């Protein structure tokens, strides 16, 4: 669908290609606008850029739909040929060592890159706003313990331990 051919990157001056992408990721109900730079580094392709957009989400607290703004950077590295031969055993990946293997493919799937990047940029807990509570929080005065045996703890007084 949306892809960049490696041969197009290779034939550019300085082996650097910059392209603008603006499309909808239907599976996520997201509209993304990105400017990506593809740079050939011998056996690797470096993809950097910036993404803006919006995604429709559902609040985890009140379950109401809301629109979340997207604004993040992309910095990915692709290997043109397979790396499986070099790493026969398990290898610990450290910061900056993660490389996506193209397995000899002749193009980079930009749609998949942006799809994965949008998912990774989402917050763990999706909340529509800082004031979203919709009556879920109650004060101490309104609290009614579910178990009558816990009633004794309402009258416990804590003493200050500063005098030692």
Image (tube, grey):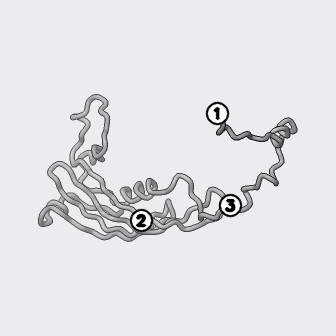
Label whose residue precedes the other's in the sequence (2 or 3): 2
Q: Secondary structure at mark 3?
A: loop
Q: Which mark is residue 82?
A: none
Which quarter of the figure is the C terminus placed in?
A: top right
Residue denoted by label 1: 164
- Say what secondary structure mark 2 lies in: strand
Q: CA distance from mark 3 to mark 1?
A: 42 Å
Q: 100 left or right of 127? A: left
Determine the residue positioned at 31% across, 40% down.
94
Mark 2, Cα crowd under 10 Å, few <14 / some 14-19 / many 20+, is some
Real-space Cα separation, disc 2 to disc 1, in angstroms:
53 Å
Residue 119, x across and y down, in percent: 46, 55
Which image quarter: residue 31? Answer: bottom left
Which residue bears the numbered disc 2? 71
The percent position of residue 8, horizontal first and vertical second, equals 19, 63
| Contact check, label 3 and label 1, Cβ < 8 Å | no
**Badge 1: few (under 14), some or many (20 or more) residues near its Cα, within 10 Å?**
few
Residue behind mark 3: 133
Question: What secondary structure is marked by label 1?
Answer: loop
Closest to the observer, 40 or 121: 121
| Cα–Cα span, label 2 and label 3 | 26 Å
């Amino acid at each position: 669908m949306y892809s960049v051919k490696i041969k197009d990157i290779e034939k550019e001056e300085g082996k650097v290609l910059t392209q603008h992408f603006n499309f909808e990721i239907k599976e996520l109900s997201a509209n993304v606008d990105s400017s990506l730079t593809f740079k050939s580094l011998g056996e690797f392709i470096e993809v950097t850029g910036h993404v803006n957009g919006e995604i429709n989400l559902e609040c985890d607290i009140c379950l109401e739909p809301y629109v979340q703004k997207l604004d993040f950077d992309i910095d990915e590295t692709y290997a043109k040929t397979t790396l499986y031969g070099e790493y026969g055993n398990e290898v610990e990946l450290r910061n900056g060592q993660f490389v996506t293997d193209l397995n000899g493919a002749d193009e980079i799937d930009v749609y998949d890159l942006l799809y994965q990047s949008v998912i990774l940029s989402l917050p763990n807990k999706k909340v529509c706003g800082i004031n979203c509570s919709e009556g879920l929080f109650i004060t101490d005065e309104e609290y009614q313990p579910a178990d009558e045996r816990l009633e004794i703890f309402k009258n416990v007084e804590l003493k200050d331990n500063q005098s030692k």
